[in-house]
Image: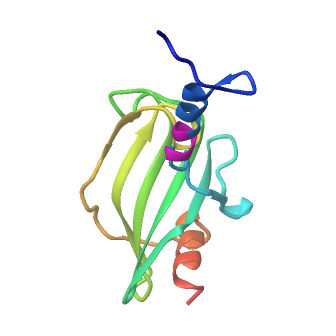
Amino acid sequence: MNFVLTYRGIHVKRLLLVTLLVLNHGPVSAEWALVEKKFQSTGIQTVYIDSDTIRREGNLVTLVTLLSWDRIQENKSPSRFHSTRITKQFDCVDKRFRSLSITHFSGHMGTGRPAGGSGSEGYWVPVEPESVNHALWELACGKQ
């Protein structure tokens, strides 16, 4: 005998499965905040920051940024990609930064499959005045 449990005409097994899948699913993406417009590269990329990722250790601040490319990027990685997630570290005292990890994504806003990147600590680079990294340094270091 095949027993099917229903509630108001809905199969309870199916309802429970869908409910568990929805509740078990973590957040799809970070809460990206747009970096101030004057620092954007109009027609090339849009830069976002996830303020929940800002971590301070002494004079060093780590955060995650997202570059949303206006056009698909083809020559910078073995795969084509629409967005790049970069973990950066800023030195608030010496006003410099470095990339800790870079991941390219096939979709926009850090979605889709990872399409290459790197994970080693980069070289320290001075923060250039009036650049997007200057805006990020100000956000990270509190306009010191």
Q: Position of residue 33 (x, y in %)?
A: 66, 60
Please state if 121 lies on the left or on the right of 83 as rendered.
left
Q: Main secondary structure of the magenta part?
A: helix
Query: Where on the picture, by quarter, is residue 98?
Result: bottom left
Position of 28 compared to 75: left or right?
Answer: right
For image coordinates 59% across by 24% down, the residue present is 5
Q: For this rendering, which residue is in front, 30 or 6?
A: 6
Q: Position of residue 87 (x, y in %)?
A: 41, 60
What residue sits 39% from the left and 45% below the top? 103
Q: Nearer the viewer, residue 110 or 141?
A: 110
Q: Which residues are magenta?
A: 20-24
Residue 71 visible, this orientation: no
Q: How many marks?
A: 0
Which colour style is shown? Answer: rainbow
Q: Quadrant of residue 40?
A: bottom right
User: Does 21 lie within the magenta span?
Assistant: yes
Let me know if residue 38 appears in the view: yes
**Residue ranking furthest to the left:** 120
Q: Is residue 83 above or below residue 63?
A: above
- Please identify the quarter of the rendering in which residue 11 is found: top right
Toward the top, the furthest residue is: 1
Give the camera-side residue of 93 and 18: 18
Image quarter hosting the C terminus:
bottom right
Q: Residue visible at 58% across and 85% down? A: 142
Residue at 38 percent of width and 27 percent of height:
79
Q: Is residue 67 part of the magenta span, yes or no?
A: no
Image location (x, y in percent) of residue 74? 44, 27
Q: Position of residue 100 (x, y in %)?
A: 32, 61
